[in-house]
Image (cartoon, coloured by chain):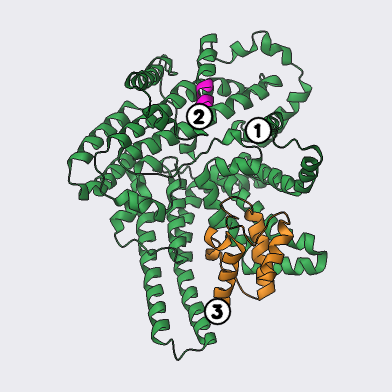
Amino acid sequence: MDAILEILGGLHPEIDFNTCNTLIDDRIIDSFDIVTIVSEISDEFDITIPVEEIVPKNFNSAKALYAMVERLIEE
Amino acid sequence: MLFTSFQFILFLTVLFVVYYLIPKKFQWMLLLLASYIFYSFAGSKYLFYILITTVSTYFTGRMLNQIQSISAAYLKENKETLTREDRKAYKAGMKKKQRRWLTICLLLNLGILGVIKYLDFTIGNINSVLDLLKVNNNLPLMGFVLPLGISFYTFMSVGYIIDVYREKYSYEKNIAKLALFISFFPQVIQGPISRFDELKETLFAEHSFNTTNISFGLQRILFGFFKKVVIADRLLVAVNTIVRDPSEYQGVYVLVGMFFYAIELYADFTGGIDITIGVAQVLGVKLPENFERPYFSKSIVEYWRRWHITMGTWFKDYIFFPISVSKSMLNLSKSCRARFGDAIGKRVPVYIATIVTWFATGIWHGAAWNFVVWGLGNCLVILVSQECMPLYDKFHNRFHVQHTLWYRLFQVMRTFWLMSFLRTFDCYRNVPTTFKMYGTIITKGNYQELFQGGLMQLGLTLSDYIVVIFGVVLLLMVSLLQRNGSVREKLAAKPYIIRYATYFAILLAILILGAYGVGYNASQFIYSQF
């Protein structure tokens, strides 16, 4: 989780990613941010994030991102 | 059959009566029949193309579903015995099989679109190169006529089949229902580009006679007609006068043309979509919105989130993300990071995907270099503004003007004019002419002409201008009211007399103020040509 918070914090230091659950809904992160997040998470956790995983419910919060990463590692 | 024709009004009236008289379970079948009748008015030979798309998409979906079912069953049965690696390898093998079917389907459908829409453009370019090389054997043009709405229904089918491949939802078992999704007549001409999972519930549902829905739908149709025949078709005359004679209309007229075209295109496209959504609503079907007051946008990125929304999200989901997060792109990004540093490495996937997406957006709008340059122009502005973000942030932190009305107005005007400049590529016959016209804005120096009768030489009379101003003010008021909720709901809460006086006034405006005149023939909606 810390690694994900660090990646997100690097993009938008002004946001509290521990509490924010509307990253996509409130347009806090945009398409360009998503590409960076996917790239950095892929590197960090050595996983492939398939394009079908790029949906708002997976990117709306740090928790949701973490859950997706755990699921992909498990698979 | 044009939306603005009496033929269409008659067609819709008959359909409406029959639709609410027949048993509800047959309603969607009637919609399918109506859609094919509507489509055949454009030429029955074009039914062939939409049928190929429907049948190939259906069978590919079925095939993908079959492979997915086999895969799921096998993994479930052998859950205990398979190792993680075995499972991964099996899944990869089955995905590869699916990818083969998907590729065939995409090649076929995008191939049809490509050949019909872009073959002559390609041949034209080859001939230009041959001319440059002084080779006399020019290739003959094929002269294909674009089937009605091919760009829209192809994109909807492609979106559907990719979603089935991605297992976002299961395939549609009933080919007739899939056929209705692909050909649904209100949206086949100019969108919105609907998604199957969002549309299926409402499209195949049984619909009761709901007076609110019907009243709201009719109001929206009425407003769409108003935008189209009172504003767009009137300004079309002035825009055509300016752009068809670039040797005569230069300098200030180019700016006037840009401004008029911005209003014309907005009234034309949003008017068409109002009619589309209104017609669907009258039939109980809810289509997605395609606009969210785009001319109030404060940046070009925001503008593209609010203009032709369903097209933007389509390109994002099926082109931008698949390219930018693909394995090869991430590997490229990694190696660029190692060689050139983090800053460049991070940008590589975003830049490449953005350029491809905007190239595709441009060429989707039309097989001409104008559209390619227009698309890439948008791309350039988006990337530059993305790079300037830290500068903007510094400026905003230093001067605290972000939330002041005058600064927001400045941002809105800046975006409006920036988009109007880019959109000029739609208008002139080629790219060099457009650039030349840009140049004359500075060099011509004929600004005084505008107030010395220049505006009266554009094919519009004083009364035409008054009607346009009245129409634009009305559009602006409706847009401002929309920010606080549905205008139709607000109107519904008003006394009976005010409501009906408003409906009657709009109807009267369409009948009296519509740009008719001798030999009137409502022009095609601009987007129906894409």
Q: How far apart are marks 1 and 2 (CA)?
A: 17 Å
Of residues A7 and B28, the one drawn nearer to the viewer in this rendering: A7
Circle nearer the N terminus (1, 2): 1
Residue B32: x and y in percent read 28, 47
| Predominant SS along the magenta part | helix
Judged by depth in the image, the label closer to the viewer, 1 or 2, is 2
Label 1: which residue? B412
**Is residue B135 in sight in this rendering?**
no
Instruction: Tell me which chain the residue with mark 1 is part of.
Output: B
Residue at point 56% right, 70% down? A67
Q: Position of residue B496 (x, y in %)?
A: 32, 22
What residue does disc 3 label? A74
Q: In which quarter of the image is residue B406?
A: top right
Identify the residue shown where x is 44% and y is 90%.
B80
Left or right: residue B45 compared with residue B29? right
Q: Is residue B7 left or right of residue A44?
A: left
Q: How far, Cα to Cα, is label 1 from label 3?
A: 48 Å
What residue is at 35 percent from the left and 42 percent from the top?
B185
Q: Which chain is green?
A: B
Task: Provide the secondary structure element on which disc 1 rests.
Answer: helix
Q: What stretch is highlighted in magenta?
A: B472-479
Badge 2 is on which residue?
Answer: B481
Residue nearer the viewer, B130 or B170: B170
Residue at 39% over, 59% down: B57
Q: Do the residues labelled 1 and 3 touch (CB within 8 Å)?
A: no
Q: Mark 2 lies on which chain?
A: B
Chain letter for the orange part: A
> Seen from this angle, which residue lies furthest front?
A19
